[in-house]
C-alpha cells in the first residue's frame, strides 16, 4: 500500500509538472486568426477620419462602409495554447519562422511591416489619382549623404529608366536595381522640371557601392517615391497596423470620395489586396480569416485579389459574395456593380 501511494503521489507530481510546463513554456509557433476590420470611409477609434481627402476639388460623402481587413497574429504561444488553437479549427498554427524569418527579430519584422503599410498608403494615393486622370511618376525622394548618388541625383529628379529599363513605380526601380552589384555602373535616366512639362531626359551614371546591411546587391543611396501632379491632399490615419494588404481598399476609398455618388450603394463592402502606383492588385495571406471577420462585421461583398480567388472560393462564409479584382479599375467596376444591384465579376 505504501508503494502504491508513493507511485500515485509521484504520478500526481509529474502530471502537475507537465501541466505547468504545458501551460507556461512557449513553443516556436504562432497562431493566425480573425483580426479586426476598419471602415476606411469613416472614422477610426481615435475619432479621426481614416481616409481624409482635402483640396480645391469636390469631396463627396459616402453612405455605406468599405472595410479593410486584418489577420490577428498570436506570438506568445504555449504548448497547451497551440493544441487548443489547432483543436478549435478557428485558428491556424504555423512555425514561428513562417512569420518571423530566421535571423530577424520580431522588432525588425514589425518595422518592415510598418514600412510596407506606409508605402501602401502612398501607392494607394498614386493609383487612385492616376485612375482619376492625374499625371503620376516616380522620383528621387531622398539621397543619403556620402552615398554614390550624392551630388549626382537630387530629391525631385523623376526617374524614367534604370539601365534602359523603363520604370513607373518605386517598386519597379527597386526591381531594376536588384541585379546590381558593388562596383557596377548604373545608368539612371532622369527628367527635371514640372511634372506637366518635364525637361529633356538625362543619363546619370552612378557607381554602386556595398550596402551597409551586408546585402550583396549594389547600393545607390536613393529612396524612390511616387509623385502626383494633383491639388488633392490625402491623409490616411489608422492605428498600429502593418503590412501592405490594405492598398486596394485605401485606393477605392479615395476614388469613392472624389467621384459623385456612393460606390458601395449604402452596403457594407470589405476587401483586401496590395496595390502599386499603376493600380495593379497583388494577392495576400490569411484570406480565410479576413473573410470571416468581414462577414462577422456585416459585410455582404468582399473584394478578392485575383491571385487569392481559388483559395477564397473554398473558404468563404455563407452570405459573403466574392468579387474578383486584378486592378483598381476592376475593383471600382465591382463596386459600381454593387451600387447598381448587379453581380460583380465573381471569383
Image (cartoon, rainbow, N blue to C red):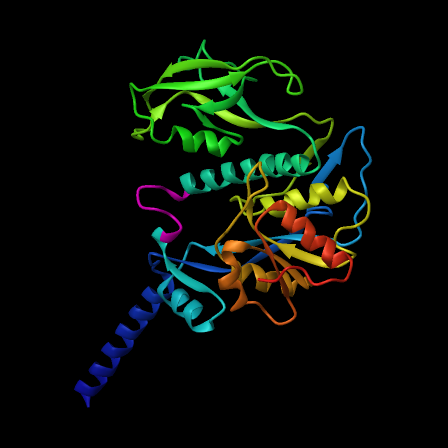
Q: Residue at position x 68%, y 35% from top?
A: 129
Name which quarter of the figure residue 48 lies in. Answer: top right
**Residue 47 visible from this viewpoint:** no
Magenta region: 98-106
In x, y percent, where is residue 234?
69, 34
Q: Is residue 78 magenta?
A: no
Residue 198 falls left or right of residue 151? right
Residue 184 lies, in percent from the top left, at 31, 20
> For the view shown, which residue lies furthest in the left direction?
3
Between 46 and 193, which is closer to the camera in this rendering? Answer: 193
Q: What residue sits 78% from the left and 42% below the top?
A: 259
Task: Judge by depth and name the residue closer to the eye, 229 or 91.
Answer: 229
Q: Is residue 161 left or right of residue 346?
A: left
Taking the image as shown, residue 336 lies to the left or right of residue 295, namely right
Magenta segment, prevailing SS (helix, strand or loop) = loop
**At which x and y percent is residue 230?**
71, 27
Q: Is 20 rendered above or below residue 126?
A: below
Residue farthest along the bottom direction in this orientation: 1
Q: Residue at x 42, y 20 (%)?
A: 221
Quarter of the image where the N terminus is located: bottom left
Picture layout, residue 176 above or below residue 36 = above
Which residue appears at 62% of the width and 45% of the height? 328
Residue 237 visible here: yes
Instruction: Where is residue 175? Give x, y as percent.
Output: 42, 33
Relative horizontal placement of residue 245, taking residue 211 as reference (left or right): right
Image position of 170 with respect to 67: above or below = above
Magenta-drawn stretch contains 99 = yes
Tell me where residue 174 sits by quadrant: top left
Amino acid at each position: 500500500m505504501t508503494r502504491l501511494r508513493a507511485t500515485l503521489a509521484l504520478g500526481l507530481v509529474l502530471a502537475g509538472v507537465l501541466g505547468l510546463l504545458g501551460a507556461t513554456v512557449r513553443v516556436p509557433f504562432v497562431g493566425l486568426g480573425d483580426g479586426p476590420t476598419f471602415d476606411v470611409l469613416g472614422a477610426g477609434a481615435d475619432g479621426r477620419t481614416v481616409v481624409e481627402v482635402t483640396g480645391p476639388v469636390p469631396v463627396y460623402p459616402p453612405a455605406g462602409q468599405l472595410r479593410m481587413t486584418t489577420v490577428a497574429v498570436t506570438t506568445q504561444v504555449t504548448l497547451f495554447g497551440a493544441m487548443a488553437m489547432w483543436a478549435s479549427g478557428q485558428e491556424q498554427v504555423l512555425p514561428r519562422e513562417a512569420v518571423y524569418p530566421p535571423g530577424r527579430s520580431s522588432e525588425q519584422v514589425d518595422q518592415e511591416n510598418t514600412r510596407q503599410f506606409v508605402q501602401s498608403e502612398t501607392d494607394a494615393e498614386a493609383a487612385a489619382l492616376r485612375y482619376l486622370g492625374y499625371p503620376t511618376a516616380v522620383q528621387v525622394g531622398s539621397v543619403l549623404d556620402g552615398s554614390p548618388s550624392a551630388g549626382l541625383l537630387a530629391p525631385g529628379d523623376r526617374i524614367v529608366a534604370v539601365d534602359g529599363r523603363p520604370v513607373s513605380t518605386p517598386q519597379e526601380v527597386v526591381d531594376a536595381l536588384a541585379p546590381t552589384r558593388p562596383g557596377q555602373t548604373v545608368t539612371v535616366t532622369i527628367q527635371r522640371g514640372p511634372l506637366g512639362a518635364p525637361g529633356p531626359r538625362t543619363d546619370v551614371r552612378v557607381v554602386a557601392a556595398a550596402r551597409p546591411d551586408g546585402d550583396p546587391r549594389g547600393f545607390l543611396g536613393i529612396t524612390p517615391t511616387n509623385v502626383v501632379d494633383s491639388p488633392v491632399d490625402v491623409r490616411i490615419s489608422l492605428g498600429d497596423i502593418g503590412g501592405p494588404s490594405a492598398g486596394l481598399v485605401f485606393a477605392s476609398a479615395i476614388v469613392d470620395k472624389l467621384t459623385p455618388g456612393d460606390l458601395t450603394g449604402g452596403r457594407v463592402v470589405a476587401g483586401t489586396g496590395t496595390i502599386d502606383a499603376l493600380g495593379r492588385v497583388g494577392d495576400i495571406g490569411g484570406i480565410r480569416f479576413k473573410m470571416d471577420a468581414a462577414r462577422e462585421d456585416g459585410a455582404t461583398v468582399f473584394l478578392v485579389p485575383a491571385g487569392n480567388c481559388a483559395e477564397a472560393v473554398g473558404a468563404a462564409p455563407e452570405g459573403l459574395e466574392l468579387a474578383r479584382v486584378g486592378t483598381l479599375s476592376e475593383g471600382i467596376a465591382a463596386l459600381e456593380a454593387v451600387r447598381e444591384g448587379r453581380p460583380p465579376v465573381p471569383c
